[in-house]
Amino acid sequence: MALMEVKNLSISFGGLRAVDDFNLTIEKGELYGLIGPNGAGKTTVFNLLTGVYKPNEGIILLDGQNITGHKTIEINHDGIARTFQNIRLFGQMPVIDNVKAALENQYEYSLFDSMTHFGRYKKVEAEMDERAMELLRVFRLDQDAATLASNLPYGQQRKLEIARAMATNPKLLLLDEPAAGMNPNETAELMDTIELIRDKFSITILLIEHDMKLVSGICRKLTVLNFGRVLAQGDTKEVLHNPEVIKAYLGDEKKPAKS
Amino acid sequence: MDPIVKSINSKRRKNEIITYGMVTAAYVILEILMKAGALSSHLTGLLVPMVYYAIVAVGLNICVGILGELSLGHAGFMCIGAFSSAVFSLIFQDSIPEVPRFILAFVIGVALSALFGFLIGIPVLRLNGDYLAIVTLAFGEIIKNLINALYLGLDSKGFHVSMKNQMALGLAPDGKMLINGAMGITGTPHDSNFTISIVVLLAALFLSQNLIRSKQGRAVMAIRDNRIAAESIGINVVRYKMIAFTISAAIAGAAGVLFSHNISTLQATSQYFGYNVSIMILVYVVLGGIGSIRGSVIAAAILYLLPELLRGLNKYRMLIYSIVLIVVMIFNWSPKARDFRDETLAKLRAKFGGKPAKEA
Amino acid sequence: MSFLTSLVNGLSLGSIYAIIALGYTMVYGIAKMLNFAHGDFIMVGCYIIFTFVSTLKIGAVPGILVAIVLCTVLGVATERIAYRPLRHAASPLAVLITAIGVSYLLENAALLIFGADTKSFTSVIGWTGIDLFGGQLHIQGVTIITILASVVILVVLQAFIHRTRNGQAMLAVAQDQGAAILMGIDVNKTISLTFAIGSGLAAVAGALLCSAYPSLTPYTGAMPGIKAFVAAVLGGIGSIPGAMIGGLVLGIIEIFARTYISSQLSDAIVFGILVIVLLVKPAGLLGKITQEKV
C-alpha cells in the first residue's frame, strides 16, 4: 500500500490557483523528488501537506488514514515531519535541546516533576539525552551539542533541522531544498546523509530541490510542478528527458543535467 | 553517559547553584549587618520590598525571557495576590495562629493570581507582540481599577459586596469591613519579613530554573525561538504558552502576598500596582538580561536600591537614575557599542593572554 | 440635553486622544517602535505654553508656536541621541526600555524645574463658545476648536502622506526599510521627519488638553499618552484614519462611562473595550492582519 496518497489537491489565494489538481502517490521507503521552477507551488504543496494551509479541494491520505484538514501539530503526530526552505531552528537553544524539544511527545513526566526535578525527571531526561545524542551522532553534530543553534555554520544548521525532524519519529519526512546555499562538498555529504537516514530509519522522504545533481542522484521518482499544475510524473530519467519538462523547467536551449 | 552531555548538564547545574549561593550569601551578610546595627532603619525597611520586586522580576522573566512575550500587566497579578491573601489573613486574624495562617494566605494568593493568569492568558495569548503588551497593560489597569471600586464586608450573614460605596454593603453592626474601596485594606497582620521573603525568592528561583531545564521549559523556549518550527515538531503552542504565563502570574502573586503582609495600609494605587510598576519591573528584567533568571534578581536588587541610595543627591536622584538607564541601554545594546566592546575585549585578551572567550 | 453635552465632551476628549494617537501611530508604523515618552512631549509642550502665558506673560500664540518648535526639536533630538543607536539592536525591547528612560528623564526634569505642585493652566482659547437650543446646550470654544483642529490635522496629514514625496517616502519606510534604502530613500531623514511631526502634534495636543483640563503637573502627559496609545491600537496601529477613529471612540466611551456608569470605573471600561475589540479584530478596527510566510 502507498504510504501517502494525494488526490486532486487544490488551493487558491485570491484569484490565483497556487496549486491545481495535484496528485501524488509515494510508496513506503521511497525517496521522491518534487521539482519545478521558482513560484511553481512546491513549498505551497508542503504547506498543504503539513496543515499550514487548508486545501480548497482534495484529500490527503497517510497510511490509508485521511489527514486532510488536520492542524500542523496533529499532522506531526500523524507522522509527517518537515524542514523549511529558510532554516527555522531554535536559535537561542543549544543544539542538543533543539533535538530534545522534538522528543517532547514521546517522553512523559509531569509539570511538578519538571519544576522540582523529582520523580521521573532524572530517569526520563537521561533517556532523552541518550536518544538526542544518538541522532546527533548520525548527523555528525554530537561534538557541537553544547553550541547555540544560531552559531552553527550554515550547512550544519540544515543538518540539525533534519535531525530535529527525525526526532519526532516520522513515517514521512519532507525536506524543503535541503541543499540550498551549500557548496558541492556539503551537498555531496548531505546526499550521503539523506540516503543513510532513509536506510537506517527505513523512512520515506519527499524532497523539494533545485540542485538537479542531487535530485537525479538520489530520487528514483519525480513530480514536476509548473504554475501549480503537475507537468510530468514518474521515473526520474524519463521525466528529465520529457521535452515538456526541459522546456518549462530548464528553458529551450539547455540540456537536462547528466544523471 | 556521554561526556558531552555530562559536561553540559553539570555546567547548567553549577550555574543554578551559583544563583542560590549568591542569594543566600547576600541574605547572610545583610542579616549580620542588621544584627550588628550597621543598617539604618530606612535601609532595613527597603529589604523586604527589594526581595519581592526581585521575585516579580523572576516571574516576569519567565514571560518575557523564556516565553518571549512582552507583558506590561504583572503589577496586576501582584495586586491580586496581595488583596486576596490580605482578605484571608484579615478574616482569620484571630482564629488561626500566625504560621499556618500565613501559609494558607500565601497559597490562596498564589492560587488566585495563577487562576487570573490562566483566565487572562486565554484571550491574551492569541495576540502577538505589541498587541499582547497593550492588552496585558489594559488588564493590569482593569484589575487595579476594579479593586479600587470594590467594597467587601463580612458579618454574621456572610459576605457583602458592592461596587458603589460602604453604605450600600448593608453591613450589620457586628460586621467587619474587609476592602473599603479606594481606602483599601487596613490592619493586615505583619506576617512577612526579610527571612520569609528570601525563602520565597529561593523557592521561586528553584522552580523557575528547574522549569527551564525540563521538557516543558524546552517546549516554551522552542515556541519563543520559532513558533512555526515548534508547531511542525508537534509542540502544542497554546498549552505551553498558557503554562508559562500562568506560572509567571503565580510568581508575581507570591510577591504580592509578601507585599500585603508587610504594609499596614494596602491600597490599589498607581504607585504600587499601576502600569508604571509593571514597566519598572520590565526594566529590571531587561537590564538583568532577558532570559537570565539570576540577572533579574541582581538587577532588581541594585536598581531598587539605587534611587534610594542616591537619596543624598535628593532632588536629582531620579534624574540621574533615568540618565543612567538610557546610557546603560545604549552601551549595552547598540550594535556599534557591542562591536566596540567585543573588539576591545579581544584586544585585551590578546595582550594579556587571558581566558578564551566564553562559550555561548 | 445631558446626552448631547456628554457626546460633545466625548468628541472633544476623543479629538485630543486622536491628535496624540496620530503621532503615536506614525512613529510606530514608520520607526517600528513604541515611543513611551510620547505622552511626556505633551507635558513639555504644556509647560512651555504655561511659561509664556502665566510666567512671562507674553501671550498664548507665541507660546504655542514656540512649544511646537521646541517639541519638534526635542522629538528629533531624542530619536537621534537615544533611539537611533538602538534601531538595529538584537532585542526590540532595548529601544522600548530606552523610551521609558526618556519618559522618566522628561518627567523628572520637569519636576526639578517647575516643582511637583499643580499649575493652573490658563486656556489658550479666549472664545467662550456658543449656546444652542436657547441656552440649554452650551458648547465651549475650546471644545469646538479642538474638534475642528483634529479634523484639519487629519486632512492635512493624509494629504501630506499621499501627495508629497516625503509622505510617500514614509509609506515606503513603513512597509520595508531595506527596500526603501535600495530605492534611494534616506531612511534616517524620513524617521527624523516622522518624529518631528509626531512631537509637533504632541505640543498641539498639549495646548488643547490643558485648555480643556487646566491642571498641569509633570505627570499630566502620561495617562493621556497611554490612552492615546490604546486608541491607536484600537483603530489599528499604523493606520492614520484608524488613530482618528480609535481616539474618538475612546473619548466618547470614556465620557459616557464617567457620566452614566461610574467615574471610578471609567478607565476599566475603556481598557475593557480595547480588550474586547482586539479579541474580535486582533489587528484593531482598521488594521490589517499580516501572516508570517512559511
Image (spheres, coloured by chain):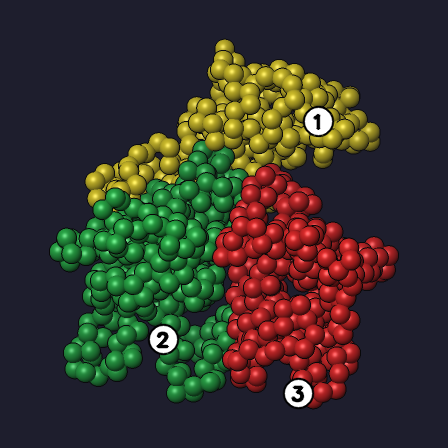
Chain colours: A yellow, B green, C red
Q: Which label sits on residue C55? A: 3
Q: Position of residue B174 (x, y in %)?
A: 23, 53
Left or right of C79? Residue B114 is left
Q: Residue at x 69, y 45 (%)?
A: C286
Q: Residue furthest top?
A: A1
Residue at 55% in and 72% down: C219
Q: Nearer the viewer, residue C156 or B189?
A: B189
Residue B320: tell me if it is visible.
yes
User: Do discs 3 and 1 belong to a common subunit?
Assistant: no
Q: CA distance from mark 3 to mark 2?
A: 38 Å
Q: Which numbered disc, 3 or 1, marks the residue closer to the eye?
A: 3
Label tally? 3
**Residue C249 in the image, given as x and y percentages of width and height:** 66, 50
Tell me the crowding category of disc 1: few under 14, some 14 to 19, or many 20 or more residues within 10 angstroms, Cα based: some
Residue to which mark 2 is pinned: B305
In this picture, residue B31 sits left or right of residue A28: left
State the CA–CA distance, disc 1 to disc 2: 60 Å
Instruction: Return the residue at label 1.
Output: A12
Q: What kind of residue is marked 3?
A: Thr
